[in-house]
Amino acid sequence: MNNQKQQKPTLTGQRFKTRKRDEKERFDPSQFQESIVQGLNQTGTDLEAVAKFLDASGAKLDYRRYAETLFDILVAGGMLGKHLSMYCLFTASEDLETMQAYAQVFNKLIRRYKYLEKGFEEEIKKLLLFLKGFTESERNKLAMLTGILLANGNISASILSSLFNENLVKEGVSAAFAVKLFKSWINEKDINSVAASLRKVGMDNRLMELFPANKRSCEHFSKYFTDAGLKELSDFARNQQSIGARKELQKELQEQMSRGETLKDIIAYVREEMKKTSISEQTMIGIVWTSVMSTVEWNKKEELVTEQAIKHLKQYSPLLKAFTSQGLSELTLLLKIQEYCYDNIHFMKAFQKIVVLLYKADVLSEEVILKWYMEAHMAKGKSVFLEQMKKFVEWLKNAEEENNSGKGRGKVLLASNMKFGM
């Protein structure tokens, strides 16, 4: 019986030591770091070999537990440890091609070990907060890598929130970093792709925060990034600010109408805003139209909504007239009406009546109506609306009284004899 016990398999001394070493590497952070650093130093600058080493090491090392340590080593050589790797992002060449190769290392690693994705994004956020602790060259490399990773979809644009840190912004670190980041991002993709990624996480309206409050203007942003060779980013930011200003203006207009402010006061307010924001009349008439049509709870019955719309638009026709002093503004309004009647099905039969009303109210001229009918209409509801307008257009063409001024007394005379739509 004792002999049988002695014959039971046991671990040899060497196997026991190997298992203990593996366990230590797996669960001891210092041993984990030493294993990674040693492996990187052996592979050197061969990034293909680095990728293979990292792929294989994940099977025996606890990447899940020590993700932060792993990424610290790969980016900065192990910032907090004494066993620094000679080969990492910060010791690499400062050029786009090398950064693209490093991006591939991270891409392969995260694709192989999907659970690292979140930890990697958190690591990038953390590194951005500590930019002041890096040299200019290290910041440039990290910026280029981050831009490439954003382009590849390895990380979300939400990481940019770290750049809005007050200290980084105050010292100009954030803006300088953003230049390198966006250059590499746009080099990999285009501005439309960048814009889509920014919008997805609500960063499209926050780019001004890269600058201190006293420099947070579209003019300063535009000059800074245009001078840095990023005019497309400047144009995007300017457009975003314009969109934001238009939304605010539309909201204020609707509130003024709801409060029952006089048309005279509303017109004065809109004209002042046009001066302040440099919004063109063509853009403004679109905002005014949307605001006017958004202040009413429309009837769902087709036969009743037309009457309701005519009554409402009669009231606000002076407001529409104030911002259709140009032919292009009139055409913009007419296209907005077409789009609105198409998008809101209950208004499909109201289109012609609305146009005739605005013609009588001296808002739309016969020239613009004819131009719209002959060539400038959009595809939405085209056949329905052209058929509705057919008789009225024929009447305009055959009318004896000509309106040489486009708007004025001639139109009033024409309107008084007209029997279409009203």
Image (cartoon, grey):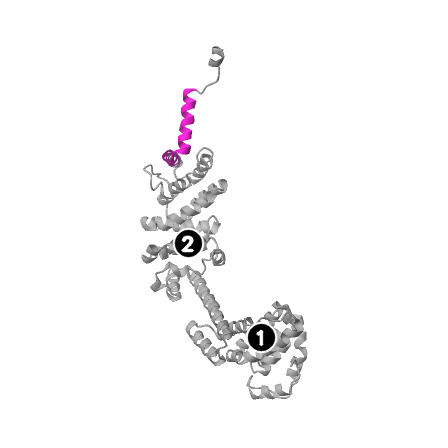
Residue lying at 55% horizontally and 80% vertically, measured from the top left = 315
Query: Is 185 drawn above or below residue 305 in the view shown?
Result: above
Q: Quadrant of residue 393?
A: bottom right
Q: Nearer the viewer, residue 393 or 359?
A: 359
Q: Nearer the viewer, residue 38 or 30?
A: 30
Whichever of callouts 2 and 1 sits on the residue coming sooner in the sequence is 2
Image position, residue 307 (x, y; %)? 63, 77
Amino acid beneath label 2: Leu
Query: Is 283 drawn above or below residue 240 in the view shown?
Result: below
* Residue 28 in view in this figure: yes
Mark 1 neighbour class, 10 Å CA radius: few under 14, some 14 to 19, many 20 or more:
many
Disc marking residue 334: 1
Amino acid beneath label 1: Leu
Magenta-span inclusion, residue 13: yes
Per the rendered image, the range of residues in magenta is: 12-37
Q: Which residue is mark 2?
A: 160
* Mark 2 residue element: helix
Q: CA distance from mark 2 to mark 1?
A: 42 Å
Image position, residue 115 (x, y; %)? 48, 42
Where, quadrant-wise, is the C terminus in this rendering? bottom right
